[in-house]
Amino acid sequence: MLIEVLVALAVVAVALAAIGSVIATTVHGVRSLDAHLMVAETARMVGTALPDRNALKPGNFSGELAGHNWRVDVLPFNFTGFNPKQPSRWVPQTVTVRIQSPSGLVLQVDTVRLRRRESQ
């Protein structure tokens, strides 16, 4: 009878160890997901705070928001597939938003914004 109790305790110990491992993995996954969501939300806030398309000039600027460092680079968009004889009213610009969390996680969002061509 004593052997049966020891075997039952060993089975329970193995089951608890497996459950603990699953819980630890889940906690790690939730923390990782939370960090990714915070970085994505910060990128969204920085992106929505950008100036109007006509006020967004080439250059870069940076700052800090909720403990996350951010940097925005605005560059001319290099595209060779247009006809220079038919100029457009729009000038495309590459906008890169880079966010770094306090833990070191980095998110970079690249997009293109159109700005009205200045009158000649």
Image (tube, rainbow, N blue to C red):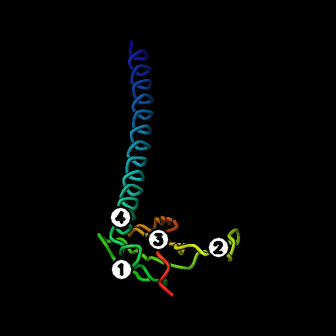
Q: Secondary structure at mark 3?
A: strand
Q: Amino acid at mark 1?
A: Gly
Helix, strand or loop status at disc 4? helix
Distance from Cα at disc 2 to Cα at disc 3: 34 Å
- From the top left corner, tell me how far across and down residue 8 is, in percent: 40, 19
Choose the circle earlier in sequence order: 2 or 1.
Answer: 1
Residue sticking out furthest to the left: 66
Disc with the residue nearer the chain's start (4 vs 3): 4
Q: Report whether residue 95 is seen.
A: yes
Residue 120: where, in percent of width, then height? 51, 88
Residue in the foreground of this view, choosing between 28 and 51: 51
Residue indicated by mark 2: 86
Q: Which residue is mark 1?
A: 63
Relative horizontal placement of residue 117, taking residue 55 as reference (left or right): right
Badge 1 or badge 4: first in the primary sequence: 4
| Mark identifier at residue 98 | 3
Instruction: State the count of labels.
Output: 4
Residues at marks 4 and 2 touching, judged by CB atoms closer than 8 Å:
no
- Spatial CA distance of label 1 from label 4 is 12 Å
| Residue under the point 40% across and 74% down | 70
State the residue in front, 119 or 55.
Answer: 119
User: Which residue is label 4 attached to?
Assistant: 42
Q: Position of residue 112 (x, y in %)?
A: 52, 67
